[in-house]
Amino acid sequence: MSHSVGGVRQAQKQKTRQALLDAALGLLEEQSLSSLGLREVTRVVGVAPTAFYRHFRDLGELGVALVEEALGSLHVMVRAILAEQDAAEERIDRTIAVVERHVREHPAHVRFVARERRGGVRAVRHAIAGELDRFAAEVAAALKTQPVSAGWRDEDVRMLAELYVDRLVTTAAELLDAREEGGEEAVERVVWRARRQLRLISLGRRHWGEEGRASAAEAEAESGPSGPSGLSGPSGSAEPSGG
């Protein structure tokens, strides 16, 4: 009996926590997190201000939870697309479609991240940066498996992943603005531009890969077969310096 009562209480606690998140997200449609008041949030939910602290230490912690809600699902979807071994243009089209659908289904989350990415609450800025950093690491891991990445240095793959992530986050914000201010025609213009930008990155990727392999071969030739100093003889031991 006590077990079932505990389960009901836990379910109610989770329901109240989610209600606080939803209320805050709704209020943040028109203001930044730094200007949001705790009492505003609890008033919408219909709980006492003291009840807030059973779920979050402060509004910063609530904001971090919203970041996880906003970006968590997008990671999985985009990473799955990038892991596929299809033609680059097909992957780009599907990736943009995923971002467009995410903006259409979760506009409040997209607006929150776009505003708070450079906002005044440090914990939330850091949470967004951390999520995007993990996003880039996941994308880099997917890109590394593609044949075009053969011979690439890890730091170059990571740099490419960061370019993709930054472009996708920017595109999401642009799609939100277009949908609210210009309608479907404006959305189509953003989609068209984003596809071209990602294709440009993809084209540059091919040439960068060629350049990277050429640079590595050149560096190896300059360093000699036995290391950067080129001072080893056929036996692998250092040449005598004389005397």
Image: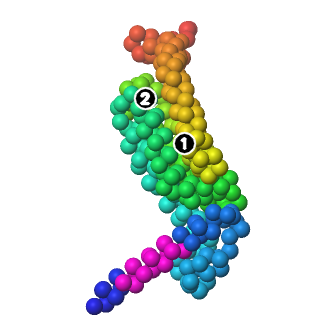
**Along the line of sight, which residue is nearer the eye, 157 or 30?**
30
**Along the line of sight, which residue is nearer the eye, 105 or 76?**
105
Please report whichever mark, 1 or 2, sits nearer to the chain's N-terminal start.
2
Instruction: Name the disc covering residue 126, or none.
Output: none
Vertical placement of 199 versus 50: above or below? above
**Along the line of sight, which residue is nearer the eye, 111 or 13?**
111
Predominant SS along the magenta part: helix
Disc 2 target residue: 88
Name the kind of residue labelled 1 in the image.
Leu
**Number of marks in the image?**
2
Local crowd at mark 2 within 10 Å, few (<14), some, or many (≥20)?
Answer: some
Name the kind of residue labelled 2 in the image.
Ala
Res. 86 image quadrant? top left
Specify start and end residues of the magenta stretch as a single range. Answer: 8-20
**Label 2: which secondary element:** helix
Could you tell me which residue is drawn at 44 percent across and 54 percent down? 73
Colour logic: rainbow
**Label 1: which secondary element:** helix
Residue 144 in the image, given as x and y percentages of width and height: 41, 33
Q: Are marks 1 and 2 in contact (CB under 8 Å)?
A: no
Q: Quadrant of the C terminus?
A: top right
Could you tell me which residue is drawn at 40 percent across and 84 percent down? 9
Most distant residue in the left direction: 1
As for residue 236 lying within the magenta part, the answer is no
Disc 1 target residue: 168
Q: Work out how far the residue at label 1 is from the one at label 2, CA to CA, in angstroms.
A: 16 Å
